[in-house]
Image (cartoon, rainbow, N blue to C red):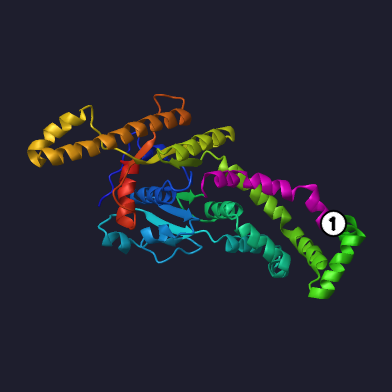
Amino acid sequence: MPASASDSPRGLRARVHGKRVLVCMGAGGVGKTTTSAALALGLALRGQKVAVVTIDPARRLASALGLGELPSQPRRVQPALFAEHGIEIDGELWAMMLDAKRTFDELIARLAPDEHAREEILANPVYRELSTAVAGSHELSAIAKLYELYEEHDFDVIVLDTPPSRNALDFLDAPGRLLGFLEGRALQVFLRPGGLSARLFGRGTALVFAIFARVTGVDMLGELSRFFRSLSGVIDGFGERTRNVASLLRDPHTSFVIVTSPEREPAREARFLIRRLHASGMHVQELIVNRVHAHRLHGFSEARVAELLSQQLGERMAARVASNLADFDTLARRDRDTVASLSRAWSTDPAGPPPIEVPQLDQEIQDLLGLAHVAEHLFD
């Protein structure tokens, strides 16, 4: 299946030309993970070296790519897998699934000033609890991995699949929240040597910690003190990297792709995201509307369609087909109105490029051939 690129100024390839980071955002259940993979595949089919990063715990992306599982570091999808499906690929497609805990550990290892400091942090029980809690919220790990891939690899494009919509806003806010913590007065209190228990907890609380240590054998106050002392060596590195990530999200080479469907709630979420991204100074490059109903009566009445089909199908069957098509026509007209409304929210220029529409497909996307089929709709 050769790749025939759409290179007109309104075509998707031209519209994302020069972009190095594409962040896919949207409500849950609209096909965002599949769209992210198809977008990456479409670019790879057209000669680029592309990495797609997913945080989808259902591992649907691994199945669609013909892989048993996705590693926590980018792995190339081998050309032989494409050849098995008759797909010709001119570039390279790499894929990975975010391992939030491992990403956080690797970041500490990179930023620690020496091996002793690294081991002290990683072995500290306070850090283990904290990093596990952070791993439960993927935003910080996602931006850390995004920055690593951008700075340390030679990918032409990185496509990032983010959490569902409202959580995706946490993704946008994560750098600012982390900077606020790193530069805040509360953390500075922890980092000052000596007197932690007296200043922060007072005598009564310090006594409780002492009893807790005697009963459990865990010196929690001591562990806290050691943890924050060891953390002081990586604070500056954390801050610098976080500022760089915040800049990357607003860089002209980074664009946000809103993925939605014509259903009422996902469309409402998409409008909310568009407004929020515009207000934050982010580049909303593309709007992709999945599952758009395309079967229509095209101006014919239901009776006229039944009449036209009756010679081939018989009157009874023709009437049933026409009635079914009339139902789809209702959905198609609803979808047309929704796409028009989304288009107005996305761009105030009526002469600008339209949203990309992917029709309602008859089957689930389960392999590379299915992904290539979606990529055709995206790019052609």
**In the image, what residue occupies the spot 60% across and 46% down?**
170
Please give left or right for residue 196 compared with residue 29 in the image: right
Q: Where residue 265 sits in the image (x, y, percent)? A: 47, 39
Q: Is residue 174 magenta?
A: yes
Please, which residue is most extreme toward the left here?
311
- Return the residue nearer the eye: 21 or 225: 225
In which quarter of the view is residue 218 placed? bottom right
Front-most of 38 and 292? Answer: 292
Asked which secondary structure carries label 1, the reply is loop
For label 1, the residue is 192
Q: Is residue 190 magenta?
A: yes
Query: For the residue marked with disc 1, what is the amino acid?
Result: Arg
Residue 50 x, y percent position in the rendering = 42, 52
Magenta-drawn segment? 163-192
Q: Main secondary structure of the magenta part?
A: helix
Q: Is residue 352 in view from this perspective? A: yes
Quarter of image, res 368: bottom left
Name the outermost residue toward the front: 316
Horizontal placement of 139 versus 95: left or right? right
Query: Which quarter of the rendered picture does the C terminus lie within?
Result: top left
Residues packed near mark 1 inside 10 Å, few (<14), some (14 to 19) or many (20 plus)? few
Residue depicted at x 42% and y 30%: 343
> Residue 276 appears at what percent x and percent y?
56, 35
| Residue 9 seen in the current view | no
Q: Quadrant of residue 215?
A: bottom right
